[in-house]
Amino acid sequence: MKIGYPCINNSIPRGTPSTFRLASYSEGKLVQTVKNNLLHLNQILKYNVKNNLLFFRISSDLIPFASHPICKFAWYNFFKSELLQIGDYIKKYNIRTSMHPDQFVILNSPKHWTVENSIRELKYHCVLLDTMSLDETAKLQIHVGGVYGNKLEAMDRFVKIYNNNAHLVDHLIKKRLVIENDDRLYNLKDCIYINQQTGIPIVFDSFHHECYNNGESLKSALEMAMSTWNMSSDGLPMIDYSSQNLGNGTHHKNYNKKRRNGKHAQTIDTKLFEKFLKETKGLDFDMMLEIKDKEKSALRALQMLGLKSAINLPNF
DNA sequence: GACTGTCAAGACCGT
DNA sequence: ACGGTCTTGACAGTC
């Protein structure tokens, strides 16, 4: 089991902007920003290795506007050696990686341009991971998409574009793509339906499952999701762990039991995490902590798991 | 230096 | 049909 956190490390000051506005796009700005982003990523990975946090979600904003038509720059050539170096470091210390393209990647949209944009975005992620020379255990995690008034049709549209459009969704994407159950549209059972017809592994999100499920127990749900992974090629199953932000959520005007307030907790609730560990005892997976204070909670989780000093490392 | 509107991209929901 | 909301962090313009 590896513990990780997504994209941002609050212990390492950035110093430089990580992105910029489309309106001010220039090749020079892109190069400078990417250069800074790669240096920053290097620092984060070193921090992670030092601290035994060996699962990390790389930010989709590493190369700003990479999939936008405005970007004609071959960043994958220009930064090839830097990217390879990062990839070597990741492999050397056996760091598990993933990326999570954001809400705009929707493969089952009825609008063909939305699907095309989505695929361009997925390709950017693939080129990035491929240029780092990472194997197919480095995953790209997305949600199923919209419902558009008819869930079965919408799911079948997902399956169809995945299975029957090899010119759009090619092997480079398929070897990395995984789907995640969400908190209101596509739950675990829906993801299983898609998995059965596509073979796409499922990233189990514990918080989303709490919000939206079909009554499965945590452990059996987790086992179902984990069984969709081909351990030899996909690697150990990944899961997302988080809990809801307490505070004024229960007073929100749209509060209800299923959705709660939908936001991720500020910091890890050790009691809930303890309970989660107890209920999932015996299962092995790589766990991403989607919690706002990022590495801080991840370190706490490591401590609770007794993994903190599991490895001895050279100093940096 | 603090404050705040806005940002490439989508979809849902209530009115 | 339409505007607000989801959820999110940081840029970028304003004071």
Image: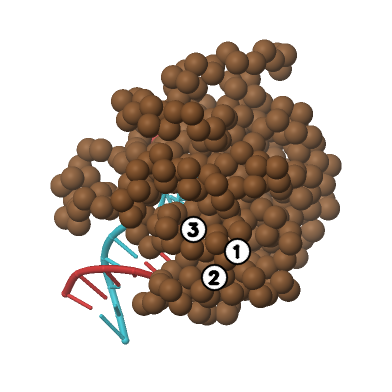
Chain colours: A brown, B red, C cyan
Where does residue A153 sit, x and y in percent of width and height? 45, 77
Label 3–label 1 contact, CB within 8 A: no
Q: Amino acid at mark 3?
A: Ile
- Relative placement, left or right, of A300 versus A176 is left
Classify mark 2: residues with Cα within 10 Å, few (<14), some (14-19) or many (20+). many
* Chain ID at mark 3: A
Residue to which mark 1 is pinned: A198
Circle 2 or circle 3, nearest the eye? 3
Residue A25 tag number:
none
- Relative placement, left or right, of C2 versus A168 is left
Residue A158 tag number:
2
Residue name at image x 62 percent, y 56 percent: A177
* Chain ID at mark 2: A
Residue to which mark 3 is pinned: A192
- Counting residues from the start of the chain, the first of labels 1 and 2 encountered is 2
- Asked whether residue A88 appears in the rendered view, the answer is yes
Q: Amino acid at mark 2?
A: Phe
Q: CA distance from mark 2 to mark 3?
A: 13 Å
- Counting residues from the start of the chain, the first of labels 2 and 3 encountered is 2
- Relative placement, left or right, of A215 versus A123 is left
Classify mark 3: residues with Cα within 10 Å, few (<14), some (14-19) or many (20+). many
Pick whichever, B9 or A279, lies toward us. Answer: A279
Quarter-wise, where is residue A114 in the image?
Answer: bottom right
